[in-house]
Image (cartoon, rainbow, N blue to C red):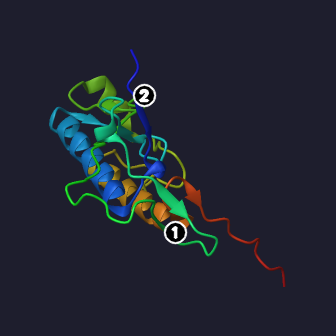
Amino acid sequence: FRTPAMKCTWFSCRRELLHCILGALLGKCISYRRGIIHRDTSDSNVWMWIPQIDERFAVPEWIKEQDGKTHFRIAAVNPEWFPRRPGVAGDFGLALDMLESKSAANGVVTTGTFPFGTSAENEAPSVTHDLEAYIYLIWLIGVNFKGPYNDVQHWPPPVEK
């Protein structure tokens, strides 16, 4: 069984990225209501689900000009178009079932993917730690990506003094 999905960094526009992150947050809220804490938020574990391979789920094609600006290939995009790829949270391998006493007792260990982990060390995990990781995720994508389709910002090396 495989879920057709791709990393959230392959967003096509800001609206799609926001739609993806909100969908993944909704999934986390549902799992938390069932007693499960994810504990491993990262750009590799927040995905855009592709419901089916169909033109309706395709993103209008982008062009990147030599000056670095991007725009849609066609002059006007149908105003009805909206990113149809909802976000999902994946990789629950480090998740804790807080309804089981064994799992909750082992939950004091701080886990997660650096730099998305919580700032609280030696503290029992809670939903606020997962939400904190989403703040880091949004900030790091905003800082490290120039535009859509995994367009990574390559920072120059620091100047030595």
- Quarter of the image for residue 160 reads bottom right
- Quarter of the image for residue 3 reads top left
Secondary structure at badge 1 equals helix
Secondary structure at badge 2 equals loop
Residue 156 to residue 113: above or below: below
Q: Nearer the viewer, residue 87 or 123?
A: 87
- Which residue of the protein is positioned furthest toward the front in this rendering? 75
First-in-chain label (2 vs 1): 2
The amino acid type found where label 2 is placed reads Gly
Within 10 Å of the Cα at label 2, are there few (<14), some (14-19), or many (20+) other Cα atoms? few
Q: Position of residue 150 (x, y in %)?
A: 54, 53
**Residue beneath disc 2:** 93
| Left or right of 33, for residue 53 | right
- Which residue of the protein is positioned furthest toward the bottom in this rendering? 161
The amino acid type found where label 1 is placed reads Val
Residue 37 to residue 161: above or below: above
Q: Quadrant of the C terminus?
A: bottom right
**Residue beneath disc 1:** 143
- Quarter of the image for residue 151 reads bottom right
Q: Position of residue 37 (x, y in %)?
A: 29, 38
Q: Nearer the viewer, residue 8 or 151?
A: 151
Within 10 Å of the Cα at label 1, are there few (<14), some (14-19), or many (20+) other Cα atoms? few
Label 2, label 1: how far apart the Cα atoms are: 28 Å
Q: Nearer the viewer, residue 106 or 95?
A: 95
Q: Residue at x 32, y 49 (%)?
A: 20
Q: Position of residue 110 (x, y in %)?
A: 46, 44
